[in-house]
Image: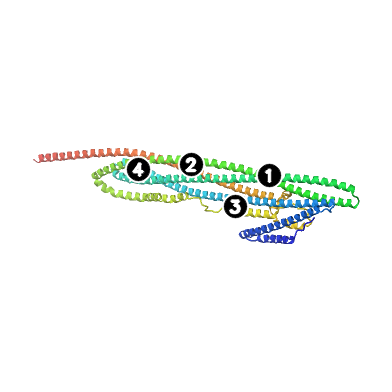
Amino acid sequence: MTIQKPSEAPAQNSAEKHEVTVAEDASIPDAEHTEVHQEDEQSEKQRLEEYIDKLEAKLGYFAKETAAAAQEAMSSSQLTPHERKLAEKDDLIATLRREGIELSKTEWRQRNAIKERGTAIQKMRAQTQQDEKAMAELRKRLARLEDSESGIKQQLRRTEQVEKQNAEYLRRVSNIEKDLENHKSDLASNKATIAVLRSQLLEAEKSAEKAENSITQADTQKLSAVQEQLEDAKLEKKLAEDVWSAELKRVNEEARQQKQQASFRETELTNEISNYESRLEALRVRAEEASSDVGGDSQAKLLRQIETLQTQYSLAAENWRTIETSLNGRIAAVEKERDEATKREADVRKKARDISSKAKRFEDQIEELTEESQSLTSQLQVSTTEMKKLQSRLQAAEASLSEAKADLDRQKQSFETELSQKLEEERARQLSQEQTPTLSIDRSASRRPSTLTPGLMTSRTPMTPDFPSPSVSRQGSMFSLAQLINGNNGNAPQTPSIHTTNDDADDAFDNRSSPQHTINDVISASTVHTGPSVQLVQHMSSKIQRLEAEKSATKDELARLVAQRDEARDEVVSMMREVDTKRKVDGKTDELESELGQVKQRYEACLEMLGEKEEEVEELKSDLVEVKKMYRELVDRNMK
């Protein structure tokens, strides 16, 4: 029996028109091309679905007609046994057609399930885009931290300049002490310059304290920012693990169900084939018995009928074999997908372990940084107490020096009048040279908190997608969607045919929307027989590999961030070394203070010597007065 398929030419013409429109759309820009391509794909899908529904309705109608005709023929009593057998065969053919329609429907349902998997893959792609946005936010935070580190470096440079100035001041003090030893007469002027230098040292120490306070604040803010980043990373890791576990469970359940359905269907098909073989053998036996009874023309008719039945049986057997091969291929594809899912699950577990180990490392590093910050704060407190003690000592020394200076001023008014002009000139020159660095230090110390706080406050802002996801990933996602739609449209499910004479319509339907020179042309003949499900699974596996490549790229970026974190740690170590050098400088200041005490002792000794000399001068004056009196008395005596 043959089945005529109408609307062949319109379908072929529509396919040619669709190919022409696709060829014309190739010249349109990317944005317009994607929109037009999506509209064409949707219209093509609707048209194909309508065409498939029409074909299924026609097949069902023809199957019903054949079944009704066969039942009528079997019910009529005037038929010969051979005609009854033919009617039974027609009934079997009708049942085969019904089963073919049911198979096509099940295949259509499987295709819809595969489309749902495509939507799941799109969701996974959206998740990867969110991960990329989170990575961009982490890069921003690292850039802000680097900016804050550059500010800290500038502060350290300024503190180094202050220390150099302190060293220069100490050198000047040593020179002044030498001048005091060499020139006792210039003690007052040199002591005045020492007082000025001490005041400048106090100002420099205050600026250094301000810089240290700003550094400690920056370190605490850095620690809080790093802790917030760790908490965000932990939350993201938990969410990713939950999503992957749910997806793996769903895929495993679907694969198990499909495998059970395929095995059940295979058993049914084997049972049906065995039944058909037993029936055919019975028919052969009956045909041989009939050939032995009937002669001549009736025997020839029976032989022809048997031949037609054999050909029909062979065709049906071939169709069932093709169906069996397609089902076997699908089962193999599902098993392959299951193996890939297990591999992905293992990879995800490995990645989760790596992320947990990294989180532990981050926590250890944060603890180390907190301990270092606590030690630095304690050291700063100790240094501040020492500085206060030194300031009190300096104030006492300055008070004693002022008293000594007052005494010397009273005793040496004439000498000070000559040297006052020189001292004023030297003071003006030193102040003009030293005011510029102190003013710059004070201004930088006053401006530093205002410049540091905004950057550090912005690091605490919530993560917002400031930058869009890379264009490459978006183009890849659009291209993958187009490939999925083309793959679904280009390879329609091949329902089991019943050897119709009109094969041109089938060829036109199969070749309607086949994309020219696409990935499907590379697939071998073994995968073509298995239907579109294997091709779609291959597309899905390629897309999942792309996602894994993107995840590896994000992993490399995380490694780069860890390297930058290590560099920041090295810089903190260098800062600690600089703090040690500052401690050494404080020790030198203690030594200088001890030397100042020695100078004070010398100064007191000098004052005592001056007092003794003044007493000697007074004694000499009294002696001179007595000598004058003696000379007057002698002169008076001689005159008398």
Which is nearer the eye, 476 or 332?
A: 332
User: What is the three-letter code of the residue carrying label 3?
Assistant: Ser
Task: Indicate how the structure is coloured in the image.
Answer: rainbow
Are the residues at dot 4 and dot 1 in contact (C-beta closer than 8 Å)? Answer: no
Mark 4: amino acid: Val
Q: Nearer the viewer, mark 1 or mark 3?
A: 1
As shown in the figure, which amino acid type bears the numbered disc 1? Gln
First-in-chain label (2 vs 3): 2
* Rendering coords of residue 328 (x, y %): 72, 46
Write down the residue under mark 2. 366
The C terminus: image quadrant: top left
Whether residue 537 can be seen here: yes
Is the C-beta separation of discs 4 and 3 under 8 Å?
Answer: no
| Sequence-earlier tag: 1 or 2 | 1
- Mark 2 vs mark 3, CA separation in Å: 34 Å
Label 4 to label 2, Cα distance in Å?
Answer: 45 Å
Disc on res. 393: none
Local secondary structure at mark 1: helix
Which residue in the protein does label 4 denote?
173
On the image, numbered disc 3 is attached to which residue? 473
Mark 4 secondary-structure assignment: helix
Residue in front for this viewpoint, 578 or 480: 480
Neighbour class for label 1 at 10 Å: few (<14), some, many (≥20)?
few
Distance of mark 1 from mark 2, alpha carbons? 53 Å
Give the Cα distance between marks 1 and 3.
Answer: 37 Å
Q: Which residue is under mark 1?
A: 260
